[in-house]
Image: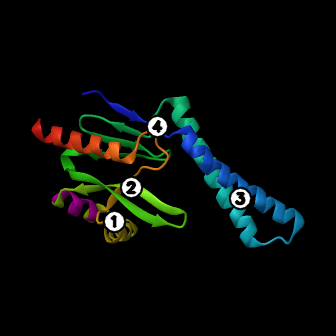
C-alpha cells in the first residue's frame, strides 16, 4: 500500500488565525484607549502566540513538504511541529471517534485504543506528570492517547476508517 500524507487545511485554519489576531487587535486597542492590565497583556501574548503557532505549522508543512500525519503500512507518524510521534498499528486494538467539549465548542478526536499490555507499558514508562495526563485522558475519553482532527484536509470519519483498515491489514500480514 502507498503512504498517505495528510496536511492541515489552509482555509480551515485561516478562520482560527483570524480570530486570534482579532483578539490581539482588541487587546492593543484596550491598551491604547484604556488601562493597562495583566489580563490584557496575557491575552495579547496568548492569542498572538496561538495565531503565530498555527501559521508556523501550516507554513512548515507546506515549505518542507512534511505532512501533519503520515500513514504507512506499519503505523501513523504525527509531526506536531515540535515533536514527531509514532503509533504502530501492531500495538493498536482499534481507533474510534469521540467529541470532547472545550471552551470553544466540541473538538473531534480519534481515540487510540491500544492493546491492554501496550497501554499498561506506556503508563508504566511515563513520568509522574505523564501518568497524571494519561489518567486524566483515560477518565475523559476512555483511552490514554488521542489524535487531533481539527483543521485537516480530510474528514475525521474518513481518517478513522483509513486507520482501522490499516490496523486490520497489519494483523493479516
Locate residue 32 relative to residue 165 in the image: left or right.
right
Q: Position of residue 140 (x, y in %)?
A: 36, 69
Alpha carbon distance from label 1 to label 3: 30 Å
N-term mark: 3 or 4: 4
Q: Position of residue 84 (x, y in %)?
A: 41, 44
Q: Residues within 10 Å of mark 3 (few under 14, many from 20)?
A: some
Alpha carbon distance from label 2 to label 3: 26 Å
Question: What residue did someone put label 1 on?
Answer: 141
Question: What residue did someone put label 3 on?
Answer: 23
N-term mark: 4 or 1: 4
Alpha carbon distance from label 4 to label 1: 25 Å
What number is the disc on residue 109? 2
- Residue range in magenta is 117-123
Find numbered disc 2 in the image and state the secondary structure of the residue it sits on: strand
N-term mark: 2 or 3: 3
Query: Is label 2 in contact with label 1 (beta carbons under 8 Å)?
Result: yes
Find numbered disc 3 in the image and state the secondary structure of the residue it sits on: helix
Question: What residue did someone put label 4 on?
Answer: 7
Alpha carbon distance from label 3 to label 4: 26 Å
Q: Is residue 38 above or below residue 44?
A: below
Amino acid at each position: 500500500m502507498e503512504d498517505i500524507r495528510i496536511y492541515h487545511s489552509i482555509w480551515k485554519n485561516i478562520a482560527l488565525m483570524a480570530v486570534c489576531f482579532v483578539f490581539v487587535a482588541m487587546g492593543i486597542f484596550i491598551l491604547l484607549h484604556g488601562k493597562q492590565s495583566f489580563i490584557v497583556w496575557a491575552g495579547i501574548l496568548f492569542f498572538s502566540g496561538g495565531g503565530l503557532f498555527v501559521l508556523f505549522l501550516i507554513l512548515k508543512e507546506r515549505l518542507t513538504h512534511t505532512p501533519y500525519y503520515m500513514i504507512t503500512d506499519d503505523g501513523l507518524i504525527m509531526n506536531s511541529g515540535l515533536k514527531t510521534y509514532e503509533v504502530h498499528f501492531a500495538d493498536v486494538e482499534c481507533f474510534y471517534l469521540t467529541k470532547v467539549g472545550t471552551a470553544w465548542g466540541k473538538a473531534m478526536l480519534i481515540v487510540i485504543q491500544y492493546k491492554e499490555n501496550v497501554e499498561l507499558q506506556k503508563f508504566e514508562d511515563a513520568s509522574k506528570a505523564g501518568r497524571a495526563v494519561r489518567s486524566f485522558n483515560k477518565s475523559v475519553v476512555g483511552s490514554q492517547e488521542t489524535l487531533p482532527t481539527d483543521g485537516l484536509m480530510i474528514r475525521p470519519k474518513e481518517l478513522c476508517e483509513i486507520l482501522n483498515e490499516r490496523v486490520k491489514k497489519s494483523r493479516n500480514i
